[in-house]
Amino acid sequence: MSVDTATVKRVAGLARIKIDDAQAERMTGELNAILGFVEQLDEVDVSGVDPLTSVVEQTMKKRADGVTDGGKADDITANAPMSEDNFFMVPKVVE
């Protein structure tokens, strides 16, 4: 796949990037070099390779799922200007 100057200008316009003709010409060469490298990577045979999430085998660290803090509703609402049944009360703002 190769990119021409018109495609570079179109993509720059979609990205709201202002470029002149000289910049578009330079970017055309750079993008074609990048796409050439990607095409080289596409030629590599990876049929027997399992996908990896890390190069080092790791097990996920897990902890017990339990409540570590709670039952402090009275403490939390103690400094509130208005509270009722451990809920913050605020003035009505919608009529």
Image: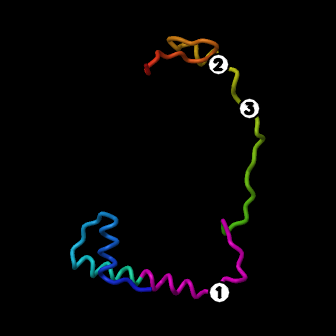
Dot 3 crowding, Cα within 10 Å, few <14, some 14–19, many 20+: few
Residue holding disc 2: 73
Residue holding disc 1: 45
Tell me which label, 2 or 3, sits earlier in the chain: 3
Residue holding disc 3: 67
Seen at 38% across and 79% down, the residue is 31
Does dot 3 land on a helix, a strand or a loop?
loop
Residue 73 percent coordinates (x, y): 64, 19
Q: Nearer the viewer, residue 73 or 53?
A: 73
Amino acid type at circle 2 is: Ala
Q: Is residue 36 left or right of residue 73?
A: left
Q: Residue furthest front?
A: 95
Check if residue 41 falls in the magenta segment: yes
Question: Which dot marks residue 86?
Answer: none
Tell me which label, 1 or 3, sits earlier in the chain: 1
Q: Is residue 75 left or right of residue 40?
A: right
The region drawn magenta spans 34-53
Residue 65 percent coordinates (x, y): 76, 39
